[in-house]
Image: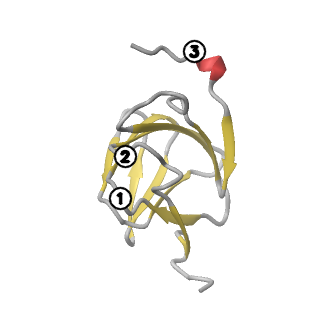
Amino acid sequence: MTIVPGADIEFADLPGRRSGDPLEHVDSASSLRIVQLTHQPRRRAHRHPHSEEVVYVRRGAGIVYVDGVRSAVGPGDVVHIPAGAAHATVPDPGEAMELICFFPHPSLADNIEETQIDVMTEETDE
C-alpha cells in the first residue's frame, strides 16, 4: 500500500492546465492526475492514444469537449473519454475546476498528444 500526502504532490504547468501526478514514484499499471483549470478564452484539445480516460469533476463547472461534442459538467459528474479522442475541459467564466483523471496506462508522458484544435471554435493552427 502507498499513501501520498496531498502536500507532496508536485504540479506541472501544461497547456491550459496544471497537472499533479500523485503516483509519479509508485510502480503501477495505471496513472492518476489531479488537474486544476481556470477559464481561458482559448483552449486546445489533447488526446491519449494508448488508453481511455475517466474524469471525475471534483469542483467547478464548465464544458467538456470530446471529438466535437460539448457537454456541460459539474461537481460529482463522471466523464468517460475513449482512447484517442480529442478532448478538453473548459471551466465556465469566473470558475476554477479541479478534475481527478484516471488512466489504465502507467505513464501519462507516453500517453498524451497535444493537438492544435481550439475547443471553443474547432479551428486548427495546423
Of the numbered discs 2 and 3, the one sitting upstream in the chain is 3
Q: Quick check: 27 left or right of 7? A: left
Amino acid residing under circle 2 = His
Q: Tags 2 and 1 in contact by the CB under 8 Å rule?
A: yes
Colour scheme of this structure image?
secondary structure
Which of these two is toward me, 71 or 107? Answer: 107
Determine crowd level at label 1: few under 14, some 14-19, many 20+ residues with C-alpha closer than 10 A.
Answer: some
Give the residue at mark 1.
50
Q: Nearer the viewer, mark 3 or mark 1?
A: 1
Q: Position of residue 122 (x, y in %)?
A: 51, 78
Residue at the spot 57% in from the left edge and 15% down from the top edge = 5
Give the residue at mark 3.
5
Mark number for residue 105? 2
Residue at the spot 49% in from the left edge and 59% down from the top edge = 112
Which of these two is toward me, 101 or 119? Answer: 101
> What element does badge 1 sit on?
loop
Mark number for residue 15? none
Whether 12 is drawn above or below 76: the answer is below
What is the spatial separation of the Cα atoms under label 2 and label 3, in whole angstroms? 22 Å
Q: Tags 2 and 3 in contact by the CB under 8 Å rule?
A: no
Residue at the spot 45% in from the left edge and 56% down from the top edge = 111
Number of on-image labels: 3
Amino acid residing under circle 1 = His
Of the numbered discs 2 and 1, the one sitting upstream in the chain is 1
> What element does badge 3 sit on?
loop
What is the spatial separation of the Cα atoms under label 2 and label 1, in whole angstroms? 7 Å
Q: Position of residue 120 (x, y in %)?
A: 55, 70
